[in-house]
Amino acid sequence: MKLIAYPLSGVEPDIRPARPTRDWLDALPQQFGYRCLPLNIASQHGWEVCAPTRVTAEWDSGTGTEAIRVTPDEPHPLNPASHFGHGILTFHIGALLRTPPGINLLVTAPFNHPKDGICGLSGIIETDWSPYPFTMNWKFTIAGIEATWEKGEPFAAIIPIPRGLMESMEPEFQPLDTDPDLAERYRTWAVSRSQFNHDLHVPDSEAAKERWQKGYYRGVNPDGSDGHPEHQTKSRGKPFIR
C-alpha cells in the first residue's frame, strides 16, 4: 500500500519514520522506561513531521491571533503561525497526503513526546479522497511559558487507521471465567507478579537479579510457553522516497 505526500510549497516537508527513542527516557536511571514495550511500540508508530527551523512560541492568555508570539530562527514557509486565536498554534504539514481506499490518517502530537504548557490536538482525516490540506494544531494551557521546537524536532505524528474499524467493533463485558484459558494464564501471572514484587526486595534473589519481568516483552505466556506468533517488539515505517 502507498502513502504519498504531494508537497505544496515547492519545499518537501521533513517527514520520517517515528523514532524509537526519547530524550526523557534516555535520562531515566538505567533508561528503565524502554522496558515498557507498549510505550516503545507507540513511540515507533507512524511517521513524524518535523520542524524546518528552530522556533519558539509564547501565549499571553488573550483570545486574538496576536496573543501568540512566534519567533523562528529563520524564515520558512512551513513555520507555525497563529491563525485561530484562543491560544492555538498552527503548523502546516506542507503536503497533501494520499492513502489507499478506506484508510484514514490520524494526525496527533508525537507519541510520548510531552511539552510543558501546551497540548497537541488530534484529528482524523479521510486522506483517501480529500483534496484539502490539513494542519497540526497545539493549544497552550499555560500563559507566559515558551514552547520550543528545535530544528528537526517532530511537531506531528501521522498514523494510518482503517475507516470504519471502530464502528465495526461490538464491545461487551463478560466474566473472566467465560474464557477459562485466558483466566488461568492471567491468574498464573498475577501470582507470579506478586511473588516477583516481594522478591525484588530480597538481596541476591532471582527477581533482584532480573529486575523486571519480561514475559510480555518477550511475547511468552506466564508459564514460559510461546505466545502469539505475530508478537512485535519493534515497529518501523519505511522512509519516504523521491
Image (cartoon, rainbow, N blue to C red):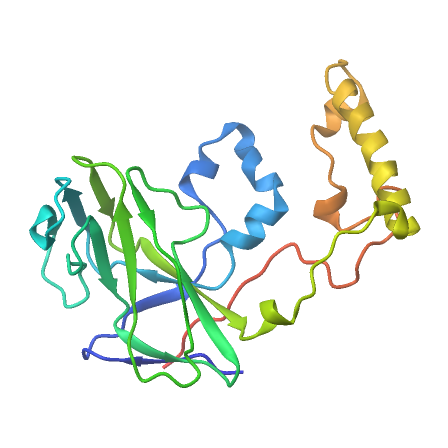
Q: Nearer the viewer, residue 120 or 51?
A: 120
Give the side of residue 52 with respect to residue 109, left or right: left
Residue 224 seen in the figure:
no
Q: Nearer the viewer, residue 130 or 220?
A: 130
Q: Residue at x 31, y 53 (%)?
A: 153
Q: Residue at x 23, y 43 (%)?
A: 147
Quadrant for the C terminus in the image: bottom left
Instruction: State how many labels appear.
Output: 0
Give the side of residue 64 with respect to residue 203, left or right: left
Q: Is residue 199 above or below residue 233?
A: above
Residue 190 seen in the figure:
yes
Give x and y (percent) for residue 124. Answer: 42, 68
Give x and y (percent) for residue 232. Answer: 67, 58
Q: Is residue 50 above or below residue 186?
A: below
Q: Residue at x 69, y 60 (%)?
A: 171
Q: Is residue 119 above or below residue 166?
A: above
Residue 154 quadrant: bottom left
Give x and y (percent) for residue 193. Answer: 78, 30
Give x and y (percent) for residue 102. Answer: 53, 82
The residue furthest left is: 66
Quadrant for the N terminus in the image: bottom right
Q: Residue at x 10, y 51 (%)?
A: 64
Q: Is residue 18 above or below residue 27?
A: below
